[in-house]
Image: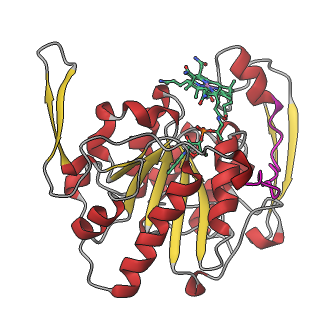
Amino acid sequence: MFDPKLKEALSRVQKPGRYTGGEPGSVYKNKDEVDVRFAFCFPDTYEVGMSFLGEKILYELLNSHKNWWCERAFMPWLDMKAEMERLGLPLYTMESKDPLTDFDAVGFTLQYELSYTNILAMLELAGIPFYSKDRDERWPLIVAGGPCACNSEPIADFFDVIQLGEGENQLPGICAEIEKAKKEGGVSKKELLRRIAKIPGVYIPAFYDVEYCEDGRVKSITPNEPGIPAVVTKAIIKDLNEFAPPTNFVVCLLYTSDAADEEDSGDLGGRRINKKKKNTHLTLPTSAGCCTASRTDT
Ligand code: B12
């Protein structure tokens, strides 16, 4: 069932289907039976994030492990963000509706630099401190990956783990270390990060001292922990046959063609520009709590 506050928020926003989950292909597991919970966050609206192929790949890959559960979260549009702040609803995942703070790791994809402010907005909405140095063992590990991860210094302080390059081998490696540490018990965040740092292609910003030139360019990056690689090399899958393409896509229930129109005109994210009236009738699927929302957008 939906939380009453979430129901209230959904009744007041445009395109409530952005926030309900329950789409065909989405993966549901019993949270008490999984060892690792991973929240995959796309720092933009649902429509934009749902077209991202990397998420399809990594979502299916992580969920193919019986005891790991990968869920999705997106940046709410301004109306929903305001409702969530008003009602004190923390940012949650589409599948379980649990807040991001309940997860072992929260991963952001760095698709384009323009989305960086949304990463901070999502952390703020989740009630998670921005800086890695301010998060101890009680907080989820905040992980980044994606094409912009290879130029990570501008945002390095916000992340515990940055994965450079393709994620098919690396992300399961990170989750395996998290699982192992949880099962051992009492493993500090620093020790967990030391273990994760040994995965090729993984950069742990806290383990490097960065010096800058006067003009802001990076002068040097030096490991400050023993056994940490001096150079982190981007992960590349040499044989694409190692990984079959995803077969179980999560299918959007939302009418999304407006997003494409708006993207063409540079106005992406839910505001209508063509003034056409549209009736939106959304029947939220039973797995998401069975509720119906009907509205007319202008
Ligand atoms: C396809 C594409 C688009 C498409 C689709 C975007 C989408 N919704 O998916 C369209 C045409 C819409 C698009 C638009 C834009 N794009 Co574009 N796009 C690409 C492109 C060519 C491929 C991205 C892709 O799908 N790759 C395939 C997936 C499977 O690979 P991947 O994303 O790299 O994911 C893998 C790894 O990176 C990693 N990974 C990814 N995320 C994560 C997360 C975690 C936690 C971990 C551990 C690993 C991980 O694992 C994945 C599997 O190996 C890239 C260039 C490139 N070669 O990467 C540019 C690129 C991402 N786009 C870019 C830009 C700038 C934009 C725009 C902002 C352009 C504009 N000014 O409008 C817009 C953004 C609009 C928007 N809001 O989406 C830039 C970003 C550069 C930057 N420094 O900001 C890139 C890098 C191109 C470039 N070199 O300039 N784009």
Which quadrant of the render holds ligand 1? top right
Q: Kindly give the residue lying farthest to the front in the view shown.
A: 239
Q: Main secondary structure of the magenta part?
A: loop
Front one among 103 and 109: 109
Instruction: Specify how the rendered protein is coloured.
Output: secondary structure
Magenta span includes 272:
no
Q: Nearer the viewer, residue 180 or 107?
A: 180
Nearest the eye: 238 or 60: 238
Q: From what the image shows, is residue 121 above or below residue 282?
A: above
Q: Total marks drawn?
A: 0
Residue at x-position 67% and y-position 46%: 239
In the visual, does 242 lie left or right of 86?
Answer: right
What is the quadrant of the N terminus in the image? bottom right
Q: Is residue 195 above or below residue 52?
A: below
Question: What residue do we see at 59% from left, 87% from top?
Answer: 33
In this view, the residue in front, 40 or 243, is 243
- Magenta highlight range: 243-257
Residue 184 appears in the picture as rendered: yes
Q: Is residue 100 visible?
A: no
Q: Residue at x 54, y 63 (%)?
A: 172
Q: Residue at x 60, y 79 (%)?
A: 67
Residue 293: which quarter of the image?
Answer: bottom right
Is 248 magenta? The answer is yes
Where does residue 132 sit, x and y in percent of width and height?
A: 26, 53
The quarter of the displayed image where residue 265 is located: top right
Position of residue 82 measured from the top left corner of the image (x, y, whole percent): 50, 44
| 86 horizontally vs 285: left or right | left
Left or right placement of residue 162 versus residue 216 in this view: right
- Residue 142, percent across and down? 38, 55
